């Protein structure tokens, strides 16, 4: 399997072209990159205005969401949502935004539907009868013979984001006239209309009409050949055997490419190639004591199907240096604000010096709003409009232009000791067909590679993974980020092994599951307690599994096929190098506000962060501000060339996009640390003054009880009294922190204004004194950086899970129906049980849709044709989910921190359903979705 052929895993000449060592070094950095690129600090970002209407608020007299310190009665944003407040980007108009002009334009994006034909022009003649001519038409290059007002993007010298690069290396927002689109659904033009009424008339006249986007003959070949894979590609090799030095990228300290010769920066390529030959021999050489089994597995393209199709509002205030104001629901708050500002380079005639992101609740994300193609289109439209402009996609347009989940084709093979059941060797080649621009596709493939062994200890293994370009709609970090694709393939194969060996499928997994002290495919050590075997043990003992054969026999007498399947997952959370930040502020009345750059996509982040102040401040936050980018420029840390941990203002990663798995561990951590600093530098000195005792006497002696600070022999103090005193004394009233996690939290020591220096697991700190508007950075000292090897870990945080699923297949319809789900998850410390259950229930529903219902063609006939909606794309409805027989059980734990469980609960669902169908039918299905037609064909 690892032979050097001219297959999709080869590097093209264009990828390695360069001069000498510089080209090789670039390649090494690409291969070693183990995380999504972090967003840089953006000095041009300005905070969203105080009182901005995009932040939800509770009306006077509303019931309190707080359920006491560290608990919530309901979501902090719950009332705003159920009472219909404006909180989503689609809700807002220019008249809602303080200081904006009142007149608002509406814009429409026209898209290509055939990347095989060159774009030649527009036919807008239908707009004459509709009295709906655009005020301005925006194209990439001028339209010859076009009589209406037009502007072209080519003349603006835009600096396009990395995510807009096609497989031909060309960066594009719109298709230039006379050239072919890079992908189905690529925008060709933006039409700006005078108002909403004109826009609606125009949309009725143009939508679904052939010939509006005009095409010519077959497209000319690109100026340079397509890349065979988006870079970086992923080659992982692990080998341990008696008498041989262990090999992995962590253990030898270098990433390796077995398809290239050794170099100064990749000295172990030939070693990886030689060890892979040994692995292939174990996988292929016949042996009566070894079972060798393999196959090809595939998953489909998915749409995120979040509640609110993408929408936004923008206005370029041309006063001064120019301020671009954005109203967006996005996961990539730092990335989108930074990319929007960077669009307008110094050579651009449109001057934009600052950006203000008014971040809204996204109305669902699932990765579909993580560096989406939508924000750059909104930004350039605002730059050329004569005032505020709004774009609001309907569901057809969202299908046509929104990010998709990558499909997968995975070929893998395993060798198993027939006597012990131990997994001996494993090889996998993963091809993830991507869209026509790179977005985050290559990093999705990277995580799929890391997940290539699921939760198993296989000491001789390799995994190759590429994101393969196509002409499909742009695909990115949507729904699981590569984990579900890999999980379906591996967990299906493991079940096949169990059947071949006539072993209990869960017991087989239990024998091979990772334990603390084992290593992953990258060689990263598992330093946390690993509960995979506990999950297997509990699942084996569950009645749903124990009684499966008896129930299957009883159902068969009723004419119903019945089966129970199991799957295990050891899904990572975080990206391997995560920069996160939070601010906690306190006014004179004791009202607490948490501020964060992350957003709540419906997973409950706002509520979780609001209850995270309670341990140190005795009270939940009263308010929370989400998606604030500009405020965190008060932190004196950033990522810059030539920096390292010896420089107190440097960090390895400033900001990441929001994802559901980052809240419970990462973002809660920095919120708690900011709360601790506020307590130590603000509340505790105030308490010492009120009690009339030395501050040193109170260190480590206080605790909160029912909202009051207590100490032995002293009268309890209410938070309000402490806050008032802190403000009177000019003590610290707000703390802003930055944290960086890479295998461990970076630790620093900080000299705060009151009390002894604090050693904290953060890498940046700024304080604001009561009565002051400005922030004071605190110098980081005595830094404890991550271990150097952590840069090659790939991932180091895991949330193990496992699921039992029962399915029934009727005698006539052949349609599989999920009738029972028993999910076990190691969630660590559970912060708010109902939020965890809600997230798990959503993961189960998504997994059912993934396994049985959802499907999009990648290219021709897919979403890019603009005619897809929920009449054709089927998602799981309540009738598809066994709400009355669905149990989510968090494992008992002594962990002091929570884990990110978003993808953890999704990954095992689809393979467990497939395994259940195999148990019910005796037929194995290696491709998703598994439909009634597939089952009928297999059984006929």
Image (cartoon, rainbow, N blue to C red):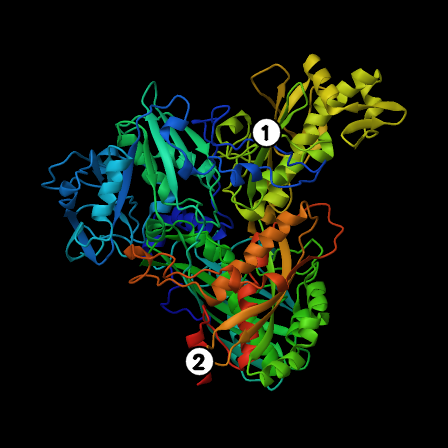
The image's mark for residue 522 is: none
Considering only vertical position in the picture, is 666 above or below 547? above
Measured as percent of width and height from the top left, residue 348 is found at: 27, 30
Mark 1: secondary structure = loop
Dot 2 alpha-carbon crowd within 10 angstroms: few under 14, some 14 to 19, many 20 or more: few
Mark 2: secondary structure = helix
The image's mark for residue 936 is: 2
Q: According to the image, label 1 marks what residue?
A: 648
Residue appearing at x 44%, y 74% in the figure: 932
Q: Distance between the residues labelled 1 and 2?
A: 65 Å
In front: 263, or 390? 390
Measured as percent of width and height from the top left, residue 156 is found at: 25, 33
Measured as percent of width and height from the top left, residue 361 is found at: 49, 39
Q: Which residue lies furthest to the right in this view?
A: 713
The numbered mark, 1 or 2, whose residue comes first in the sequence reads 1
Residue depth check, mark 1 versus mark 2: number of the one nearer the observer: 2
Residue 449 makes an appearance in the image? no
Quadrant location of the C terminus in the rendered image: bottom left
In front: 151, or 260? 151
């Amino acid at each position: 399997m690892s032979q050097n052929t001219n297959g999709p895993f080869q590097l093209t000449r264009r990828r390695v072209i360069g001069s000498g060592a510089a080209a090789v070094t670039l390649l090494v950095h690409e291969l070693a990159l183990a995380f999504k690129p972090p967003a840089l600090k953006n000095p041009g970002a300005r905070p969203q205005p105080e009182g901005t209407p995009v932040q939800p608020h509770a009306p006077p007299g509303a019931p309190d969401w707080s359920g006491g310190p560290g608990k919530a009665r309901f979501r902090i944003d719950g009332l705003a949502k159920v009472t219909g407040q404006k909180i989503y980007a689609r809700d807002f108009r220019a008249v809602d935004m303080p200081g904006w002009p009142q007149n608002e334009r509406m814009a429409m994006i026209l898209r290509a539907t055939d990347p095989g034909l060159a774009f030649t022009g527009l036919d807008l003649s239908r707009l004459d009868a509709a009295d709906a001519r655009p005020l301005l038409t925006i194209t990439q290059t001028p339209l010859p013979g076009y009589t209406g007002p037009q502007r072209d993007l080519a003349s603006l010298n835009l600096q396009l984001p990395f995510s807009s690069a096609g497989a031909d290396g060309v960066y594009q927002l719109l298709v230039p006239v006379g050239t072919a689109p890079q992908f189905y659904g690529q925008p060709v033009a933006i039409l700006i209309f005078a108002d909403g009424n004109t826009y609606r008339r125009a949309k009725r006249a143009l939508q679904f009409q052939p010939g509006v986007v005009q095409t010519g003959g077959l497209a000319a070949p690109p100026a340079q050949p397509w890349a065979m894979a988006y870079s970086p590609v992923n080659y992982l090799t692990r080998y341990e055997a008696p008498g041989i030095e262990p090999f992995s990228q962590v253990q030898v300290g270098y990433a390796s490419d077995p398809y290239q010769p050794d170099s100064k920066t990749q000295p172990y390529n030939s070693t990886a190639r030689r060890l892979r030959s040994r692995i292939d021999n174990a996988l292929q050489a016949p042996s009566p004591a070894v079972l060798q089994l393999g196959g090809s597995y595939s998953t489909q393209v998915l749409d995120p199907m979040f509640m609110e199709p993408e929408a936004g509002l923008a206005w370029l205030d041309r006063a001064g240096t120019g301020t671009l104001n954005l109203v967006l629901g996005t996961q990539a708050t730092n990335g989108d604000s930074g990319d929007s500002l960077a669009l307008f380079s110094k050579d651009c005639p449109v001057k934009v010096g600052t950006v203000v992101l008014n971040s809204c609740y996204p109305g669902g994300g699932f990765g579909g709003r993580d560096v989406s193609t939508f924000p750059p289109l909104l930004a350039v439209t605002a730059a050329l409009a004569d005032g505020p402009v709004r774009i609001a996609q309907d569901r057809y347009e969202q299908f046509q232009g929104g990010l998709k989940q990558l499909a997968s084709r995975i070929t893998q093979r395993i060798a198993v000791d027939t006597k012990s059941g131990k997994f001996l060797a494993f090889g996998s080649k993963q091809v993830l067909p991507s869209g026509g621009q790179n977005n985050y596709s290559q990093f999705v493939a990277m995580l799929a590679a890391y997940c290539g062994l699921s939760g198993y200890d296989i000491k001789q293994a390799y995994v190759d993974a590429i994101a393969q370009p196509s002409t499909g709609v742009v695909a990115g970090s949507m729904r699981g980020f590569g984990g579900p694709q890999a999980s379906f393939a591996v967990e299906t194969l493991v079940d096949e092994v169990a059947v071949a060996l006539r072993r209990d499928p869960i017991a087989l997994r239990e024998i091979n599951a990772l334990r603390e002290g084992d290593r992953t495919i990258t060689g990263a050590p598992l330093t946390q307690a690993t509960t995979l075997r506990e999950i297997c043990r509990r699942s084996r003992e569950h009645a749903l599994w124990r009684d499966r054969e008896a129930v299957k026999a009883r159902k068969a007498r009723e004419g119903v096929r019945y089966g129970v399947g199991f799957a295990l997952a050891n899904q990572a959370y975080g990206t391997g190098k995560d920069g996160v930040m939070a601010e906690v502020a306190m006014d004179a009345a004791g009202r607490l506000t948490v501020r964060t750059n992350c957003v709540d996509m419906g997973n409950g982040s706002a509520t979780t962060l609001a209850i995270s102040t309670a341990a140190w401040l005795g009270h939940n936050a009263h308010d929370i501000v989400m998606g604030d980018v500009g405020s965190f420029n008060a932190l004196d840390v950033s990522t810059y060339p030539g920096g390292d941990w010896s420089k107190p203002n440097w960090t390895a990663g400033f900001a990441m996009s929001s994802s559901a798995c980052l809240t419970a561990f990462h973002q809660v951590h920095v919120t708690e640390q900011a709360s601790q600093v506020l307590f130590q530098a603000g509340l505790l000195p105030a308490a010492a003054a009120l009690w009339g005792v030395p501050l040193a006497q109170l260190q480590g002696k206080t605790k909160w009880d029912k909202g009051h600070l207590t100490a032995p022999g002293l009268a309890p103090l209410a938070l309000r009294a402490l806050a008032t005193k802190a403000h009177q004394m000019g003590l610290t009233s707000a703390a802003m922190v930055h944290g960086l996690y890479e295998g461990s939290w970076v630790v620093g020591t900080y000299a705060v204004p009151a009390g002894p220096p604090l050693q904290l697991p953060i890498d940046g700190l700024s304080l604001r004194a009561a009565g002051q508007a400005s922030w004071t950075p605190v110098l980081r000292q005595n830094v404890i950086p991550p271990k150097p090897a952590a840069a090659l870990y790939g991932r180091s945080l895991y949330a193990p899970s496992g699921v039992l699923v029962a399915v029934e297949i009727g005698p006539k319809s052949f349609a599989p129906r999920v009738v029972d789900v028993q999910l076990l998850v190691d969630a660590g410390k559970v912060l708010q049980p109902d939020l965890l259950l809600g997230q798990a229930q959503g993961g189960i529903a998504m997994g059912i849709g993934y396994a049985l219902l959802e499907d999009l063609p990648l290219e021709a006939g897919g979403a890019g044709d603009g005619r897809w909606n929920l009449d054709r794309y089927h998602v799981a409805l309540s009738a598809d989910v066994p709400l009355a027989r669905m149990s989510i059980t968090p494992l008992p734990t002594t962990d002091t921190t929570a884990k990110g469980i978003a993808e953890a609960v999704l990954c095992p669902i689809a393979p467990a359903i497939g395994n259940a169908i195999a148990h019910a039918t005796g037929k194995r299905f290696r491709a998703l979705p598994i439909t009634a037609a597939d089952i009928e064909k297999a059984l006929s």
